[in-house]
Amino acid sequence: MLTKLWKVDKNVDNLITYPQIRQAATLLMENHVVALPTETVYGLGGNAESDDAVAKIFAAKGRPSDNPLIIHIANQAQLANIVREIPEMANQLMEAFWPGPLTLIFNKQDGKLSEKATAGLSTVAVRMPDHPVALALIEASGLPIAAPSANLSGRPSPTTAGHVHDDLDGRIAGIVDGGPTGVGVESTVVDCTGDVPVILRPGGITKEQLEAVVGEVSTDPALADPEQAPKSPGMKYRHYSPNAPLYLVDGEVEDIQQLVDEKRAEGLKVGVMTTEENRERYQADVIYPCGRRTQLESVAEALYDTLRAFNESNVDIIYGEIFPETGVGVAVMNRLTKASGYPIIRK
Ligand code: AMP
Ligand code: MG
């Protein structure tokens, strides 16, 4: 399949009238799949009402079919059409954070969406992205758009159109290039079907931000306990992984350097994933900084690009620094521990 590539300037007025957006929207209406920028990561969009389109999303990514998709909308009327009710806590959260990196779980109205999009669940995950290109495309198509991250399943999520191209060229109908995304980690997923909102996946909106709006917020205990089945089906899969094994180290620069030295003595090509503050302090074959330690938002923004960069450098093993689990650091550590898949080395 030939994958079309459109470039758009996200800052222009009346994006919806641009031919790139019209063409991409037409492909969506014909049940083809198209990658689009959002403020978190690039999404692989398809008509959420169509089994055919949703099947194409799962096939292009190689995604397990029991992992439901987030439905992206551009206005409240689209929400009312697919959910059974809107709880008061959801209204407060939408008022505060939509459009934005927050996905809410609602009870769904039957018969409105492809059962494949929701993996047969009685609930549906919905989000209004804070990106002019995503909103213009959804509006131009007039459809609810199912959109998981636009990467091959298991690989780091894409934060540029180039990442999408690397993974999915020839497998999807098109890519709308609206420049690099901003937040860098996926949306926070919050279940609003119970008495208290429950975080099922940490993300761009922090627990502290949610609590400032709705008071008590709990977190799915399975997120901290690998023995428990998570409530969000996608959280059980290994994700975001670079090609080489990634080991996270809770320790000082000297501790990590010692591990690096041991592996280099064995003849391995060793990478270090560090931060701007510490990059000059290591000696290794490949050293990539991932944002600034003092500004966790910058770590989130750079995370997937840094993980992908190690694939180009063909290292045999990567050691990575860990981050404090406060604010967006919770989401960063959630993604890093999944990318690693190994227990953190404690020094
Ligand atoms: P992705 O599309 O890769 O950003 O992943 C979407 C996340 O939302 C996955 O972790 C899904 O398991 C989760 N999700 C989607 N729909 C639901 C739902 N109805 N209930 C719980 N989690 C969901
Ligand atoms: Mg994903």
Image (cartoon, helix red, strand yellow):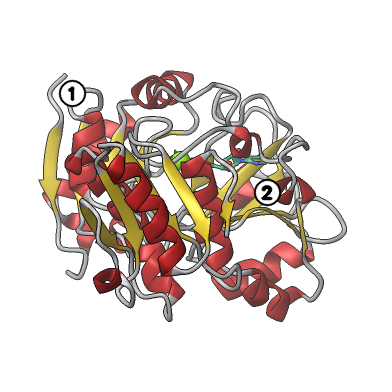
Of 254 and 250, which appears nearest the observer? Answer: 254
Q: How many marks?
A: 2
Q: Quadrant of residue 327?
A: bottom right
Q: Quadrant of residue 321?
A: bottom left
* Crowding near the residue tagged with mark 1, few <14, some 14–19, many ≥20 C-alpha atoms within 10 Å: some
Q: Quadrant of residue 67?
A: top right
Residue 225, compared with residue 12, is above or below; it is above
Rendered residue at 20%/35% (across/down): 166
* Crowding near the residue tagged with mark 2, few <14, some 14–19, many ≥20 C-alpha atoms within 10 Å: many
The residue singled out by tag 2 in the image is: 105
Q: Which mark is residue 100?
A: none
The residue singled out by tag 1 in the image is: 170
Name the spot of residue 221 as percent of width and height, x first. 78, 50
Q: Quadrant of the N terminus?
A: top left
Work out whether mark 1 precedes mark 2 in sequence or the reverse, and give the earlier one.
2
Rendered residue at 53%/38% (across/down): 341
Q: Amino acid at mark 1?
A: Gly
Q: Residue furthest front?
A: 265
Residue 88, compared with residue 273, is above or below; it is below
Q: Secondary structure at mark 2?
A: strand
Name the spot of residue 148 as percent of width and height, x first. 44, 39
Q: Secondary structure at mark 1?
A: loop
Q: Amino acid at mark 2?
A: Ile
Q: Quadrant of the C terminus?
A: bottom right
Horizontal side, residue 257 vs residue 14: left or right: right
Q: CA distance from mark 1 to mark 2?
A: 33 Å
Q: Nearer the viewer, mark 1 or mark 2?
A: 1
Name the spot of residue 85 as percent of width and height, x first. 75, 51
Rendered residue at 54%/57% (across/down): 333
Name the spot of residue 152 as percent of width and height, x first. 35, 30
Of 94 and 336, which appears nearest the observer? Answer: 336
Q: Is mark 2 within 8 Å of ligand 1?
A: yes
